[in-house]
Image (cartoon, rainbow, N blue to C red):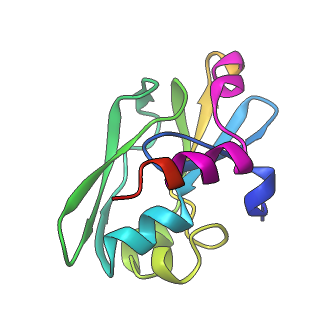
Amino acid sequence: MPKQEEVKYTKTHEWVHVSGQEALVGLSEHAQHEMGDIVFVELPKSAQNVEKEKPCAVVESVKAAFDIYAPVSGKIAALNDEVSKEPALINQSPLDKAWLFKVQMTDPEQAKGLMDWNAYQEFVKQNAH
């Protein structure tokens, strides 16, 4: 699985690992930490079309429900059913076992606009409350 330095990040705290035409998507370490204990995950439907920066999934923690946004446009190619069965995986292993879904990208160029690790760390610092 990817390391933090190998993935790209969104301003809505999703991580993205691009491999060819596919983008593996999950929730950042920072996001899961801020949310607290995750108790429910609603993934998009298999083969559903998703649009960049539009909500496509929901994660609920003991604090609140949070939308998960598609980092790129495309079609859902795979879902991580393990995370639906055991939402706490996101807290335990956000970058490994707890990926959420895979998108077959319609425009791989969209991934170029995402933040790298250093830019994401700076973004998190600037937006800390």
Residue 22, x across and y down, in percent: 70, 36
Q: Nearer the viewer, residue 84 or 93?
A: 93
Q: In which quadrant is the N terminus drawn? A: bottom right
Residue 72, x across and y down, in percent: 55, 28
Left or right: 70 as drawn, with respect to 9? left
Residue displayed at 33% across by 82% down: 37
Q: Quadrant of residue 84?
A: bottom left
Q: Main secondary structure of the magenta part?
A: helix
Q: Nearer the viewer, residue 19 or 11?
A: 11
Residue 12, x across and y down, in percent: 42, 43
Left or right: 3 as drawn, with respect to 98? right
Q: Nearer the viewer, residue 32 or 123?
A: 123
Residue displayed at 37% across by 69% down: 34
Rendered position, 94 above or below 24:
below
Q: Nearer the viewer, residue 83 or 34?
A: 34
Residue displayed at 73% across by 61% down: 4
Left or right: 72 as drawn, with respect to 37? right
Rendered position, 30 above or below 8:
below
What count of labels does the image hold? 0
Rendered position, 94 above or below 45:
below
Q: Quadrant of residue 42?
A: bottom left
Q: In which quadrant is the C terminus drawn? A: bottom left
Residue displayed at 41% across by 28% down: 53
Residue 106, x across and y down, in percent: 61, 17
Left or right: 118 as drawn, with respect to 54? right
| Magenta-drawn stretch contains 102 | no
Rendered position, 66 above or below 12:
below
Range drawn in magenta? 109-124
